[in-house]
Image: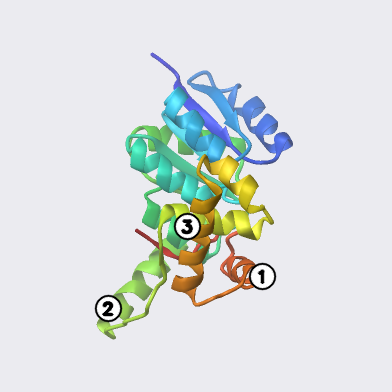
Amino acid sequence: MKPITVLLADDHNVVREGLRTLLQMESDIEVVGEAETGRKAVQLTKELLPAVVVMDLAMPLLNGLEATRQILKEQPATRIVILSAHGDDAYVEQAIEFGVAGYLIKQTSALVLAKAIREVFKGNKFFSPSIAREIENRQQRSFHGRARGSDARTVRLTSREIEILQLIAEGTANKQAAAELGISIKTVEKHRQHLMSKLDIHDTAGLTRYAIAEGLIESGVRMTIE
């Protein structure tokens, strides 16, 4: 029987090395690649086609949530398990909406992570107990919100706009952003203008503050994606 192939995505080398060492002890799991950025995770998933991606949220260049969205759009059969220090509803809600198969907090033991990988590979969902409770609470809030006829408005940003917004918040210059995304400087500037128009924010400092306030640097993007 072939082992379950796994891609590890975390920006800390020591975390990836630790996870690889622990998972190598499992005879039915094989780590086939590692990614230190969200963009690299998307790229390696296309190349290696792992069965499961273990994804951190706080990833540079492209946050873990947006990387998850892009991976599942291109490779919907891939099972993604979020492994993050963040377990509050802002992160959990977005992750579930994007279609993750599991969500674990980083205090989770290696045995539990291995179990999660096996369960999601079989097509099941797997969540840390605290996350499972948050999911239940979220469902209750959603039900009561519908009952009240909630009409909360959300900002709709495209995938590319979210990428640009994160790069702005990380202090990336237009030229660097263009090179990173493989687009022209003029296209980067156009996306900046669209962001300013949509968010009604008209300077770079304001965009940066907005991204930080929304938790983009920590990957807690609370936006509806088109």
Q: Are marks 2 and 3 in contact (CB under 8 Å)?
A: no
Residue at horizontal 56 percent and vertical 75 percent from the top: 202
Question: Which residue corresponds to mark 3?
Answer: 161
Q: Residue furthest front?
A: 186
Residue at horizontal 48 percent and vertical 45 percent from the top: 67
Q: How is the image coloured?
A: rainbow
- Nearer the observer: mark 2 or 3; the answer is 3
Residue toward you, 185 or 194: 185
The image quarter in which residue 17 lies = top right
Say which element carries label 1.
helix
| Image vertical order of residue 88 relative to residue 76, above or below | below
Image side of residue 29 versus residue 10, left or right: left
Q: Amino acid at mark 3?
A: Glu
Q: CA distance from mark 1 to mark 3?
A: 16 Å
Question: Which residue corresponds to mark 1?
Answer: 205
Q: CA distance from mark 1 to mark 2?
A: 36 Å
Label 3 Cα neighbours within 10 Å, binned few <14 / some 14-19 / many ≥20: some
Q: Quadrant of the C terminus?
A: bottom left
Q: Amino acid at mark 1?
A: Ala
Q: CA distance from mark 2 to mark 3?
A: 29 Å
Q: Residue furthest right?
A: 14
Q: Horizontal and vertical percent for residue 47? A: 45, 24
Q: Horizontal and vertical percent for residue 194? A: 46, 65
Question: Which residue corresponds to mark 2?
Answer: 146
Image side of residue 149 versus residue 117, left or right: left
Q: Amino acid at mark 2?
A: Arg
| Image vertical order of residue 22 relative to residue 92, above or below | above
